[in-house]
Image (cartoon, grey):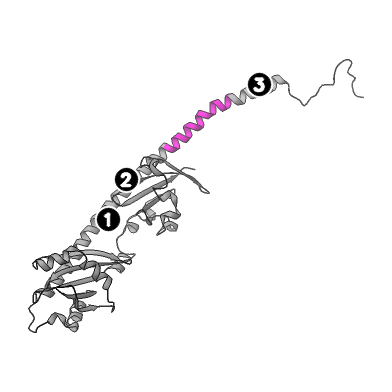
Amino acid sequence: MMPKFKGKTKPNLHKPSMETVMRWMVTLLLGFVVLLPVFAGVTQYEQNKAKADVEDVLAFMQTNCRKYDNYRLANTTEALQDVLTKVKTLTAYRYEEEDALLNENRLQSYAKFQYLTGIFVLDENFSVLAHYDKAGKDESLLLSQIIGDKNAADILNYPQKTYADQICINDNTYNYAISARQDKPGLVICYTDITRFQNDKNELSLSTMLDAEMFRQDVTVVITDGTRVISSNCEQLEEQLVQYYPIADVLVGGEQLTPDTLLQLKNDSGTWYGMFTQYRDYYLYAFSRVA
Protein backbone atom coordinates (compact mmCIF):
# COMPACT_ATOMS: atom_id res chain seq x y z
CA MET A 1 0.00 0.00 0.00
CA MET A 2 1.32 3.44 -1.01
CA PRO A 3 1.92 5.88 1.89
CA LYS A 4 -0.42 8.84 2.18
CA PHE A 5 0.78 12.42 2.41
CA LYS A 6 -1.44 14.86 4.23
CA GLY A 7 -1.27 18.54 3.49
CA LYS A 8 1.91 18.16 1.43
CA THR A 9 2.65 17.79 -2.27
CA LYS A 10 4.14 14.50 -3.30
CA PRO A 11 7.92 15.09 -3.64
CA ASN A 12 9.68 14.74 -7.05
CA LEU A 13 12.55 12.38 -6.33
CA HIS A 14 14.21 12.98 -9.77
CA LYS A 15 14.35 16.77 -9.82
CA PRO A 16 17.47 18.32 -8.23
CA SER A 17 17.07 21.35 -6.09
CA MET A 18 18.00 24.83 -7.26
CA GLU A 19 20.81 24.82 -4.74
CA THR A 20 22.24 21.64 -6.28
CA VAL A 21 21.99 23.06 -9.80
CA MET A 22 23.79 26.22 -8.77
CA ARG A 23 26.47 24.15 -7.08
CA TRP A 24 27.00 22.17 -10.31
CA MET A 25 27.17 25.30 -12.43
CA VAL A 26 29.72 26.89 -10.11
CA THR A 27 31.78 23.69 -10.17
CA LEU A 28 31.71 23.53 -14.00
CA LEU A 29 32.56 27.22 -14.29
CA LEU A 30 35.47 26.88 -11.90
CA GLY A 31 36.68 23.81 -13.78
CA PHE A 32 36.51 25.68 -17.07
CA VAL A 33 38.39 28.63 -15.58
CA VAL A 34 41.06 26.29 -14.21
CA LEU A 35 41.39 24.16 -17.36
CA LEU A 36 41.34 27.03 -19.86
CA PRO A 37 44.88 28.19 -19.03
CA VAL A 38 45.98 24.56 -19.13
CA PHE A 39 44.60 24.09 -22.64
CA ALA A 40 46.05 27.42 -23.70
CA GLY A 41 49.41 26.46 -22.20
CA VAL A 42 49.41 23.11 -24.04
CA THR A 43 48.53 24.81 -27.32
CA GLN A 44 51.23 27.43 -26.81
CA TYR A 45 53.75 24.71 -25.96
CA GLU A 46 52.86 22.81 -29.14
CA GLN A 47 53.17 25.98 -31.22
CA ASN A 48 56.52 26.91 -29.67
CA LYS A 49 57.89 23.40 -30.16
CA ALA A 50 56.62 23.26 -33.76
CA LYS A 51 58.14 26.67 -34.49
CA ALA A 52 61.52 25.59 -33.10
CA ASP A 53 61.35 22.37 -35.16
CA VAL A 54 60.50 24.09 -38.45
CA GLU A 55 63.11 26.79 -37.88
CA ASP A 56 65.76 24.06 -37.57
CA VAL A 57 64.46 22.37 -40.72
CA LEU A 58 64.43 25.65 -42.67
CA ALA A 59 68.02 26.35 -41.61
CA PHE A 60 68.99 22.88 -42.85
CA MET A 61 67.18 23.50 -46.14
CA GLN A 62 68.93 26.82 -46.63
CA THR A 63 72.30 25.14 -46.12
CA ASN A 64 71.46 22.52 -48.75
CA CYS A 65 70.24 25.16 -51.20
CA ARG A 66 73.54 27.00 -50.74
CA LYS A 67 75.48 23.80 -51.39
CA TYR A 68 73.42 23.13 -54.50
CA ASP A 69 73.96 26.66 -55.83
CA ASN A 70 77.69 26.34 -55.28
CA TYR A 71 77.69 22.99 -57.08
CA ARG A 72 75.57 24.29 -59.94
CA LEU A 73 77.72 27.41 -60.35
CA ALA A 74 80.93 25.39 -60.43
CA ASN A 75 79.42 22.82 -62.77
CA THR A 76 78.02 25.47 -65.12
CA THR A 77 81.28 27.41 -65.18
CA GLU A 78 83.21 24.27 -66.07
CA ALA A 79 80.72 23.33 -68.81
CA LEU A 80 80.77 26.83 -70.34
CA GLN A 81 84.56 26.88 -70.29
CA ASP A 82 84.50 23.55 -72.12
CA VAL A 83 82.25 24.75 -74.96
CA LEU A 84 84.24 28.00 -75.15
CA THR A 85 87.46 26.04 -75.65
CA LYS A 86 85.82 24.06 -78.44
CA VAL A 87 84.64 27.10 -80.39
CA LYS A 88 88.04 28.81 -80.00
CA THR A 89 89.78 25.68 -81.27
CA LEU A 90 87.47 25.55 -84.29
CA THR A 91 88.02 29.19 -85.26
CA ALA A 92 91.75 29.35 -84.47
CA TYR A 93 92.71 26.36 -86.64
CA ARG A 94 94.41 27.38 -89.89
CA TYR A 95 92.65 25.63 -92.74
CA GLU A 96 94.37 25.14 -96.10
CA GLU A 97 91.28 25.51 -98.24
CA GLU A 98 89.22 28.69 -98.42
CA ASP A 99 85.85 28.76 -96.65
CA ALA A 100 86.68 25.54 -94.88
CA LEU A 101 84.28 26.49 -92.09
CA LEU A 102 81.40 26.36 -94.56
CA ASN A 103 81.94 22.66 -95.20
CA GLU A 104 79.05 20.97 -93.38
CA ASN A 105 80.78 17.58 -93.41
CA ARG A 106 83.70 19.16 -91.57
CA LEU A 107 81.34 20.79 -89.08
CA GLN A 108 79.58 17.47 -88.53
CA SER A 109 82.84 15.62 -87.90
CA TYR A 110 84.04 18.29 -85.49
CA ALA A 111 80.70 18.40 -83.60
CA LYS A 112 80.63 14.61 -83.18
CA PHE A 113 84.26 14.47 -82.08
CA GLN A 114 83.74 17.28 -79.54
CA TYR A 115 80.29 16.09 -78.35
CA LEU A 116 78.59 19.27 -79.53
CA THR A 117 74.91 19.45 -80.42
CA GLY A 118 75.45 21.93 -83.22
CA ILE A 119 77.47 24.67 -84.88
CA PHE A 120 76.49 27.91 -86.67
CA VAL A 121 78.77 29.84 -89.02
CA LEU A 122 77.59 33.42 -89.66
CA ASP A 123 78.76 36.35 -91.77
CA GLU A 124 79.15 39.90 -90.48
CA ASN A 125 75.40 40.49 -90.96
CA PHE A 126 74.48 37.47 -88.82
CA SER A 127 73.27 35.55 -91.87
CA VAL A 128 73.71 31.77 -91.64
CA LEU A 129 76.40 30.50 -94.02
CA ALA A 130 76.58 26.97 -92.64
CA HIS A 131 74.84 25.02 -89.91
CA TYR A 132 75.00 21.54 -88.46
CA ASP A 133 72.65 20.16 -85.81
CA LYS A 134 72.86 16.67 -84.41
CA ALA A 135 69.06 16.22 -84.50
CA GLY A 136 68.59 18.04 -87.80
CA LYS A 137 66.81 20.99 -86.18
CA ASP A 138 67.15 24.45 -87.68
CA GLU A 139 67.34 26.02 -84.18
CA SER A 140 66.46 29.42 -85.63
CA LEU A 141 64.87 30.50 -82.35
CA LEU A 142 68.03 29.61 -80.45
CA LEU A 143 70.13 31.57 -82.94
CA SER A 144 67.88 34.63 -82.78
CA GLN A 145 68.13 34.67 -78.99
CA ILE A 146 71.91 34.39 -79.09
CA ILE A 147 72.56 37.09 -81.70
CA GLY A 148 69.90 39.31 -80.12
CA ASP A 149 72.26 39.80 -77.21
CA LYS A 150 74.78 42.65 -77.54
CA ASN A 151 77.69 40.29 -76.92
CA ALA A 152 77.47 38.90 -80.45
CA ALA A 153 77.81 42.39 -81.93
CA ASP A 154 80.69 43.20 -79.56
CA ILE A 155 82.65 40.18 -80.78
CA LEU A 156 82.21 41.32 -84.39
CA ASN A 157 83.68 44.71 -83.44
CA TYR A 158 86.36 43.21 -81.21
CA PRO A 159 87.33 39.80 -82.70
CA GLN A 160 89.71 39.10 -79.82
CA LYS A 161 86.71 38.68 -77.53
CA THR A 162 84.82 35.46 -76.83
CA TYR A 163 81.63 34.82 -74.93
CA ALA A 164 79.85 31.84 -73.34
CA ASP A 165 76.52 31.55 -71.55
CA GLN A 166 73.56 29.31 -70.78
CA ILE A 167 70.10 29.86 -72.24
CA CYS A 168 66.66 28.23 -71.82
CA ILE A 169 64.20 28.07 -74.71
CA ASN A 170 60.94 26.10 -74.75
CA ASP A 171 61.94 23.95 -71.77
CA ASN A 172 65.32 23.16 -73.36
CA THR A 173 68.60 24.38 -71.88
CA TYR A 174 71.72 25.07 -73.95
CA ASN A 175 75.31 25.97 -73.23
CA TYR A 176 76.77 28.03 -76.06
CA ALA A 177 79.91 29.95 -76.94
CA ILE A 178 80.70 32.60 -79.58
CA SER A 179 84.00 33.33 -81.27
CA ALA A 180 84.95 35.49 -84.26
CA ARG A 181 86.03 33.87 -87.50
CA GLN A 182 89.73 34.28 -88.22
CA ASP A 183 89.54 33.87 -91.99
CA LYS A 184 86.73 36.36 -92.72
CA PRO A 185 84.40 38.72 -90.83
CA GLY A 186 81.75 36.69 -89.07
CA LEU A 187 81.03 34.49 -86.10
CA VAL A 188 81.07 30.84 -85.12
CA ILE A 189 78.64 29.60 -82.49
CA CYS A 190 78.93 26.18 -80.85
CA TYR A 191 76.12 24.90 -78.67
CA THR A 192 75.25 21.88 -76.54
CA ASP A 193 71.78 20.82 -75.45
CA ILE A 194 72.10 19.88 -71.77
CA THR A 195 68.39 19.40 -71.03
CA ARG A 196 68.56 15.65 -70.55
CA PHE A 197 71.42 16.01 -68.08
CA GLN A 198 69.41 18.45 -65.99
CA ASN A 199 66.46 16.04 -65.93
CA ASP A 200 68.64 13.07 -65.07
CA LYS A 201 67.40 11.61 -61.77
CA ASN A 202 70.97 10.57 -60.95
CA GLU A 203 72.20 14.13 -61.35
CA LEU A 204 72.63 16.15 -58.17
CA SER A 205 69.60 18.36 -57.69
CA LEU A 206 67.55 19.92 -54.94
CA SER A 207 65.28 16.87 -55.05
CA THR A 208 68.13 14.46 -54.40
CA MET A 209 69.71 16.75 -51.82
CA LEU A 210 66.44 16.88 -49.85
CA ASP A 211 65.73 13.18 -49.85
CA ALA A 212 62.57 12.09 -48.03
CA GLU A 213 64.57 9.89 -45.67
CA MET A 214 66.35 12.95 -44.27
CA PHE A 215 63.20 14.06 -42.45
CA ARG A 216 60.85 12.57 -39.88
CA GLN A 217 57.47 11.38 -41.10
CA ASP A 218 55.79 14.21 -39.23
CA VAL A 219 57.76 16.87 -41.13
CA THR A 220 56.93 17.99 -44.68
CA VAL A 221 59.26 20.25 -46.65
CA VAL A 222 58.53 22.14 -49.87
CA ILE A 223 60.72 24.26 -52.13
CA THR A 224 59.14 26.38 -54.87
CA ASP A 225 60.39 28.93 -57.37
CA GLY A 226 57.20 30.94 -56.89
CA THR A 227 55.48 29.14 -59.77
CA ARG A 228 55.91 25.42 -59.22
CA VAL A 229 57.11 23.00 -56.56
CA ILE A 230 60.67 22.04 -57.49
CA SER A 231 61.41 19.83 -54.50
CA SER A 232 59.52 18.15 -51.68
CA ASN A 233 59.67 15.04 -49.54
CA CYS A 234 55.98 14.60 -50.42
CA GLU A 235 55.81 12.92 -53.82
CA GLN A 236 52.29 14.22 -54.50
CA LEU A 237 53.59 17.79 -54.49
CA GLU A 238 56.57 17.28 -56.83
CA GLU A 239 56.39 19.46 -59.97
CA GLN A 240 52.92 20.77 -59.05
CA LEU A 241 51.96 24.40 -59.68
CA VAL A 242 51.71 26.39 -56.47
CA GLN A 243 48.39 27.88 -57.58
CA TYR A 244 46.83 24.51 -56.78
CA TYR A 245 48.44 24.48 -53.33
CA PRO A 246 47.82 27.96 -51.88
CA ILE A 247 49.85 27.26 -48.74
CA ALA A 248 52.91 27.02 -51.00
CA ASP A 249 52.22 30.46 -52.46
CA VAL A 250 53.47 33.38 -50.37
CA LEU A 251 51.21 35.74 -52.29
CA VAL A 252 48.10 34.14 -50.75
CA GLY A 253 48.89 35.59 -47.35
CA GLY A 254 49.32 39.09 -48.73
CA GLU A 255 51.41 41.55 -46.77
CA GLN A 256 50.61 39.82 -43.47
CA LEU A 257 52.44 36.65 -44.43
CA THR A 258 56.09 37.03 -43.45
CA PRO A 259 58.93 34.57 -42.74
CA ASP A 260 58.06 34.92 -39.03
CA THR A 261 54.42 33.93 -39.52
CA LEU A 262 53.46 30.60 -37.94
CA LEU A 263 51.04 28.94 -40.35
CA GLN A 264 48.45 26.39 -39.26
CA LEU A 265 46.99 23.59 -41.38
CA LYS A 266 44.42 20.97 -40.45
CA ASN A 267 43.67 17.79 -42.38
CA ASP A 268 42.71 14.18 -41.74
CA SER A 269 46.14 13.40 -40.30
CA GLY A 270 46.02 16.15 -37.66
CA THR A 271 47.19 19.70 -37.08
CA TRP A 272 50.32 21.07 -38.74
CA TYR A 273 52.31 24.18 -37.94
CA GLY A 274 54.71 25.62 -40.47
CA MET A 275 56.78 28.56 -41.59
CA PHE A 276 58.46 29.75 -44.76
CA THR A 277 61.62 31.61 -45.62
CA GLN A 278 63.34 32.69 -48.82
CA TYR A 279 66.77 31.84 -50.20
CA ARG A 280 67.65 33.75 -53.37
CA ASP A 281 64.96 32.71 -55.87
CA TYR A 282 63.66 29.81 -53.76
CA TYR A 283 60.75 29.80 -51.32
CA LEU A 284 61.30 27.22 -48.57
CA TYR A 285 58.48 25.76 -46.45
CA ALA A 286 58.55 23.36 -43.51
CA PHE A 287 55.53 21.93 -41.66
CA SER A 288 55.54 19.88 -38.46
CA ARG A 289 52.58 17.77 -37.34
CA VAL A 290 51.65 18.19 -33.69
CA ALA A 291 48.45 16.14 -33.45
Above-or-below relation of 201 to 242: below
Residue at (10, 65) in percent of width and height? 161
Classified by dominant secondary structure, the portion drawn in magenta counts as helix
Amino acid type, mark 3: Arg
The answer to which image quadrant residue 206 occupies is bottom left
Amino acid type, mark 1: Tyr
Nearest to N terminus: mark 3 or mark 1: 3
The answer to which image quadrant residue 273 occupies is top left
Question: Which residue corresponds to mark 1?
Answer: 68
In the image, 256 versus 53, the foreground residue is 256
**Residue 134 percent location from the top left of the image:** 26, 78
Nearest to N terminus: mark 2 or mark 1: 2
Local SS, label 3 = helix
Residue at (18, 65) in percent of width and height? 164
**Residue 54 percent location from the top left of the image:** 38, 44
- Few, some or many residues within 10 Å of mark 2 (<14, 14–19, 20+): few
Question: Which residue corresponds to mark 3?
Answer: 23
The magenta-colored residue range is 30-47
Local SS, label 1 = helix
For residue 36: magenta? yes
Q: CA distance from mark 3 to mark 2?
A: 54 Å
Nearest to N terminus: mark 3 or mark 2: 3
**Residue 3 percent location from the top left of the image:** 89, 21
Looking at the rendered structure, which numbered label has been put on residue 44?
none
Can you say which quadrant of the picture contains the N terminus? top right
Question: Which residue corresponds to mark 2?
Answer: 59
Local SS, label 2 = helix
